[in-house]
Image: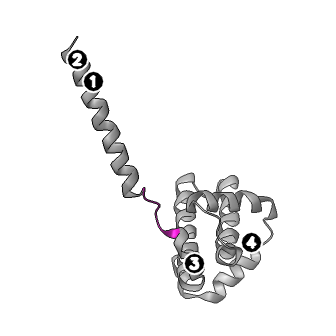
């Protein structure tokens, strides 16, 4: 499958041949959403879902290992991320890691400091 990247005709024929794995449609979609951490628009994830369906079929038939399936799923999710960055900029904000704001970190530090001071006071006076 390394050479499929350079040959769009082979990718299209592969997708057409493996478009019949409807029984894996929901599972493939759920795996991609779980790996990405958000629901991508269908246009960005269509090909990745088709490839994931084919990989699920191969996994359940014993043609590929779970480790190789996981690697393929990560590659498919990276493809979805690339499609979003290139063609769907309105969803790029979903790709950014969510960080806690500084105020929550500061609040946590203050609460921790107060608890340490209370523990020291209790320890010293007991």
Real-space Cα separation, disc 3 to disc 1, in angstroms: 50 Å
Q: Position of residue 70 (x, y in %)?
A: 55, 57
Above/below status of 82 relative to 69: below
* First of labels 1, 4 by sequence position: 4
* First of labels 3, 1 by sequence position: 3
The residue depicted at 31 percent of the width and 42 percent of the height is 110
**Neighbour tally class for label 1: few under 14, some 14-19, many 20 plus, Cα within 10 Å:** few
Q: Which residues are magenta?
A: 95-100
The answer to whether residue 78 is seen in the rendering is no
Task: State the residue in front, 3 or 104.
Answer: 104
- What is the secondary structure assignment of the residue under circle 2? helix
Q: Is residue 88 left or right of residue 2?
A: right
Q: Is residue 65 magenta?
A: no
Residue 30 lies in quadrant: bottom right
Q: Which residue is mark 3?
A: 84
* First of labels 3, 2 by sequence position: 3
Q: Position of residue 77 (x, y in %)?
A: 56, 68
The residue depicted at 70 percent of the width and 54 percent of the height is 61
Of labels 1 and 4, the one closer to you: 1
Q: Is residue 99 magenta?
A: yes
- What is the secondary structure assignment of the residue under circle 1? helix
Above/below status of 113 relative to 54: above
Q: Assign the magenta stretch its main secondary structure.
A: loop
Real-space Cα separation, disc 1 to disc 4, in angstroms: 63 Å
Q: Is residue 108 left or right of residue 62?
A: left
Q: Which residue is mark 4?
A: 18
Q: Is residue 120 left or right of residue 102?
A: left
In the drawing, what numbered circle is on residue 123?
2
Of labels 3 and 4, the one closer to you: 3
Q: Which residue is mark 1?
A: 119
């Amino acid at each position: 499958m390394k050479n499929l990247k350079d040959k769009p005709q082979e990718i299209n024929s592969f997708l057409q041949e493996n478009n019949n794995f409807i029984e894996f449609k929901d599972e493939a979609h759920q795996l991609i959403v779980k790996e990405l951490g958000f629901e991508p628009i269908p246009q960005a994830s269509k090909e990745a879902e088709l490839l994931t369906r084919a990989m699920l079929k191969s996994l359940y038939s014993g043609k590929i290992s779970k480790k190789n399936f996981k690697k393929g799923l990560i590659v498919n999710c990276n493809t979805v991320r690339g499609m979003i960055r290139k063609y769907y900029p309105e969803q790029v904000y979903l790709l950014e890691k969510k960080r806690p704001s500084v105020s929550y970190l500061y609040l946590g530090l203050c609460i921790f400091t107060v608890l340490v001071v209370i523990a020291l006071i209790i320890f010293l006076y007991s």
